[in-house]
Amino acid sequence: MNLICVDNDISMLRRVEMICKKKYQLDETKTFSKVRDAVEWMERGHSVNIALLGIDGNMNGLILAQNIKKHFPTTVIILLSSHKEFAVDAFKIHASGYLLKPVTSEKLTEAIQYAMQLCH
């Protein structure tokens, strides 16, 4: 099972890596601070089972979520944002979760656990 996290918040990326290494046996955990880097990684043939995607003011994370769903329809997507107004858009693309920032490690752990359950 592969998990990616794409967010411009480096501390969020570090927490995701730490939680995944400590608690879960994933085949791969990849973090990206830029959407472009995540897209290039997927274009090289990597699959995605779980995607934690940050949404900022320009909505790049939401656009990435749409593209992931197009190429990997069974991917579980959980969106992270400090903007509650994007929640409706998140569910339009069938995201499985939406976490408002700042996200605690506990909430992040719960979201990853939930996503893993959906993958099985």
Image (tube, grey):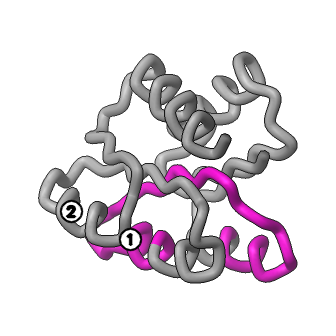
**Left or right side of 44 for 114:** left
Report, in whole angstroms, how far the alpha carbon at label 2 lies from the one at label 1: 9 Å
Q: Is residue 38 left or right of residue 25?
A: left
Per the image, the residue denoted by label 2 is 86
Are the residues tagged 2 and 1 within 8 Å (C-beta)? Answer: yes
Whole-percent x and y of residue 101?
30, 39
Bounds of the magenta segment = 38-65
- Quadrant position of residue 61: bottom left
Asked if the magenta segment contains residue 82, the reply would be: no
Please give the name of the residue rendered at 40% of the width and 50% of the height, measured from the top-left corner.
96
Residue 15, disc: none
Q: Secondary structure at mark 1?
A: helix
Image quarter in which the C terminus is found: top right
Taking depth in this image into account, of 10 and 24 the one nearest to the observer is: 24
User: Is residue 61 shown above or below 113?
Assistant: below
Instruction: Residue under label 1, please give it.
Output: 62
Position of 93 with respect to 83 (left or right) is right
Instruction: Look at the picture and state if 16 lies above or below 54.
Output: above
**In the picture shown, does residue 70 fall above or below 110?**
below
Mark 2 residue type: Phe
x and y percentages locating residue 98 in the rendered image: 32, 47
Residue 69 location (% of width, % of height):
53, 73
Query: Is residue 58 in the magenta section?
Result: yes
The answer to whether residue 29 is above or below residue 22 is below
| Residue type, label 1 | Leu
Give the residue at x 69% y 72%: 37
Q: Which residue appears at 36% of the width and 31% of the height?
A: 103
- Mark 2 and mark 1 lie on one chain; the one further toward the N terminus is 1
Mark 2 element type: helix
Residue closest to the far left: 85
Q: For mark 2, does the 10 Å Cα neighbourhood hold few (<14), some (14 to 19), or many (20 or more) residues?
A: some
Task: Examine the image and state in which quarter residue 66 appears.
Answer: bottom left
